[in-house]
Amino acid sequence: MTETAKTATRMRSEIEEIPEALERLIASGSVAIAEAATELRRIDPRLVTTIARGSSDHAAAYLKYAFEVYGGLPVASLGPSVSSIYGATLRLDRSVSLAISQSGQSPDIVETARMSRAGGALAIALTNDIRSPLAHVCDHCFDIAAGPERSVAATKTFVNSVVAGLLLLAHWKQDDRLIEALGRLPGHCRQAIDCRWDPLMERMQARDSLYVLGRGPSLAIANEMALKFKETCQVHAEAYSAAEVMHGPVSIVDKGFPLLVLAANDASRGAVAGAIEKLAASGPDIFATGAPLPCSTQLASAATGHPATDPLLAIVSFYAFIEELARRRGKNPDVPPNLRKVTETV
């Protein structure tokens, strides 16, 4: 590890805590998760809804793909304003609602979870504070066990929120292979923290715009990466599906434009590679992590051996990268301008 990478910020310390935070979650959350999984098998829901904002909404998007691909259930994101601003009540019988919030404080998330439960859903909170208002309005509450997170940019709470949802899915569907993959995840995350993305680091020190591309769960990771570029570096980044980028956004991809591509080792790999071949004709600078892609600079990556967990390693490597990039650009990633750790919206 370089001296630059060792420079202490709260964000860097919290990134390095990710493996231990995951170990706590896996060890401490098994009873609560098993109880909820048993109830889910009993009620046999036909729909999953998610309630979240910010990084938590990116975690929800990751879980959407996981629940649909590996659980066979449709997942819809509920707009918190539908309840908190417009006062609507939705009919949600035979459904489960996942409310994700590291603080559990935001009034609109709490109100939407309350409404979901009143509408007939089994409401489950994924939060880092089991004494929060969100925990009190839900049927079940999972402590994501991330420990205190003081840096404004969420890192370990994002990873633990996703893993808490994946643990629920794995135990609900009694998917032993996924359970085993999640148990090995802390060790893989230790490897991912040490994956350096120096080629992209050099490219982005003087660049203020890029696209981040992915598909499936990796699209959720792309959204989280784009947010962190903005939060920590004040770099304008947009996340797109490797399919959707061809429907308009491709028009500004020209020679030298940076593209960060998340090439997961799953069923999306061929489609992503095909899209990148088309984009390469415009001459962008393409950086890829995961599966090797044509016309790209390959970034270091770790792998879990399971397509439901592999994309999480990309975000762990990225967090280490973006914290260092922020400092190289003269920014303090712990105190980004105009932001607070807890954002409460109505």
Image (cartoon, rainbow, N blue to C red):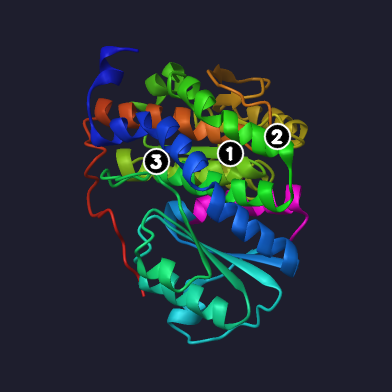
Looking at the rendering, which quadrant does residue 150 occupy? top left
SS at mark 1? strand
In the picture, which quadrant includes the C terminus? bottom left
* Residue kind at label 1, given as amino acid type: Leu
* Residue kind at label 3, given as amino acid type: Thr
User: Of residues 298 and 335, which is closer to you in this image?
Assistant: 335
User: Of residues 319 and 280, which is closer to you in this image?
Assistant: 319
* C-alpha gap between disc 1 and disc 2: 9 Å
Q: Compared to 114, does 329 lie above or below? A: above
Residue 64 lies within the magenta run: yes
Image mark for residue 204: none
Image mark for residue 272: 2
Residue 207 visible = no
Counting residues from the start of the chain, the first of labels 3 and 1 encountered is 3
Residue placed at 44% from the left, 51% from the top?
Answer: 55
Q: Are marks 1 and 2 in contact (CB under 8 Å)?
A: yes
